Amino acid sequence: MLGCCAQTQQIKVAEQPLQLDAKPNILWLVVEDMSPILAAYGDNTIATPNISQLASQGVTYTNVYSTSGVCAPSRAALAMGMYPSSFGANHMRTTSNTEQTGLPKYEAVPPASAKMLSQYMREQGYYTTNNLKTDYQFKAPKAAWHENGPYAHWRHRPAGQPFFAVVNFTTTHESGLFEPYGFRKIESRHYFSDDAERIAKLPQHHSIKTKESETAVHLAKDSEFDIPPYLPDTPLVRRDMWKMYNNLAETDRQIGAVLQQLKGDGLYDSTIIVFYADHGGPLPRQKRLIYDSGLKVPMIIRYPQAQLAGSRDDQLISFVDFAPTTMALAGLAVPEHMQGINFLSAQASPREYIHAAADRFDEVTDVIRAVKDQRFKYIRNYRPEQGYYLPLAYRERIPTMQELLRLKAQGKLTPAQAQWFRQQKPVEELFNTATDRHELNNLADHPDYQDKLAELRGELNRWLNAINDQPELPERALIQQLWQDRDAQPVTAPAQLQRQGDKLHLSSATDGASIAYRFNVDGQSPANWQLYQTPFKAPASGQLQVISHRIGYLESDLVTFDLATLQLAKATHALNTNKQ
């Protein structure tokens, strides 16, 4: 049973007390494909004044890790508070690359009792918005958010209602390094506040970018960069490094525009602002890998009234911890299916380990699992017969990737750069990330580290068993498990309607289905759906439209009831865009 706390709550950050309202506003600022390359983490390559202000007024978390080195599985973890490999969400992506893999489209299927974080927040009185990007490895139910798309904004909530708002920034995405170079035009929406008319005039597809001649230059192109040893120091790589930092500077400006909206609304000091990246950096041997370069992310939280301003917190934090922590901040009990912890709890012990997994990425497949403590990373490779580098068409559009392949063909890679291109890889790897931050020196066979190897090996086994992860299960067999041996993706049962006095009761025969409804009066239906929670009164005339949806299943047919007679008017899958 989910419950709410009293008027205020007390939690601790770095053992310091923090006072919050019972239901504080919560804003997530989510950037893509970015390692901790910020001044707050010691990288002064470029100024990011808005992010730096959050750090000076908030808490900088120094040990935050995604569950995967790529976005969709990591976003599944954020949405559900579960490890992606525990519910079929770790193969990137589940609904594409069918021609290359020969696999059908499918979606991750969490337990029937599981709901998205946003739905839990909505059920407890929060106005929930997600600005544009989802990418959860499953289709979000229609009522999981009050608003979901390019126009979503906390400003549209009823006066005084607390909000949980997610704003996504994609300028730093890997594709920002592709030629021709430019910024994604859709991202200009951040400068337009909630001006729907101006946003509607932007190209809606993320692939449409500014021309290089009209792309803002925030950093001198001849700047010096700290190029990691696994990448070559060539003009082409330096240009990609410049692009990466220039994209970050543009993102900082976009974040500043959103924060100014919050300040203009008088909400800056009553909102918990969480800034983070969805996984590590965009460059080769960063994105998709489960080295720290692919997993470690920045996270800064500014608490109301700038409490604990300028402090740092070094505890280990996993993406599976975000959902339970957010629910705790809102005064809600954490559901049993969530596999993370509340990292702000004054009572709970800090996390000892973080865990990560890698499986299919688009058209290529590997099987890797990892566990890390504060100092050491253990990696288990289930396919040692194949190399770490796998030819991935999307990644090979990056000039740095092309440069690596060119130098490899010429035999000009250094030993550190050539490691990624080994034809085989060891079954086990162990790295001291405190002294070897690029994870180039494998200690698994070193006699001095056998106790640590055994400890982390045992912890990985414990974790796999605890979350029922089966690393060696073929993806086709996984799909059959998710579909419960059906020949096709299961479909949510349509809603049933019953009258209870002067109120209407909705239900679905599918266990775990959420129900969304809206009224069509005089031929007009609102764009947003209401979440069914308890029986409700309805208008005397018009139509009631209802869709049921269990996460991972196809949503039900749209069922329409005539309100004058309360009889079924029609059932159609015209709105069911997931039907194949």
Image (spheres, helix red, strand yellow):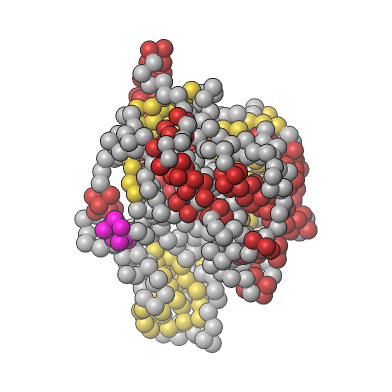
Q: Name the magenta segment's main secondary structure.
A: loop
The residue sitting at the top extreme is: 448
Vertical position of residue 195 compared to residue 353: above or below: below
Q: Nearer the viewer, residue 296 or 286?
A: 286
Residue plotted at (35% across, 53% down): 363
User: Picture coordinates of residue 120 (x, y %)?
Assistant: 51, 53
Visible residue check, residue 409 = yes
- Extreme residue toward the bottom, this view: 522
Where is residue 299? Give x, y as percent. Answer: 61, 40
Residues drawn in magenta: 98-107
Residue at x 36%, y 78% (from the top left corner): 572
Q: Is residue 96 above or below residue 11?
A: below
271 or 290, which lies in front?
Answer: 290
Within the magenta stretch, is there residue 492?
A: no
> Looking at the image, is 384 positioned above or below residue 119?
above
Q: For the point 59% across and 64% down, which residue is it?
A: 209
Percent of width and height locating residue 298? 60, 40
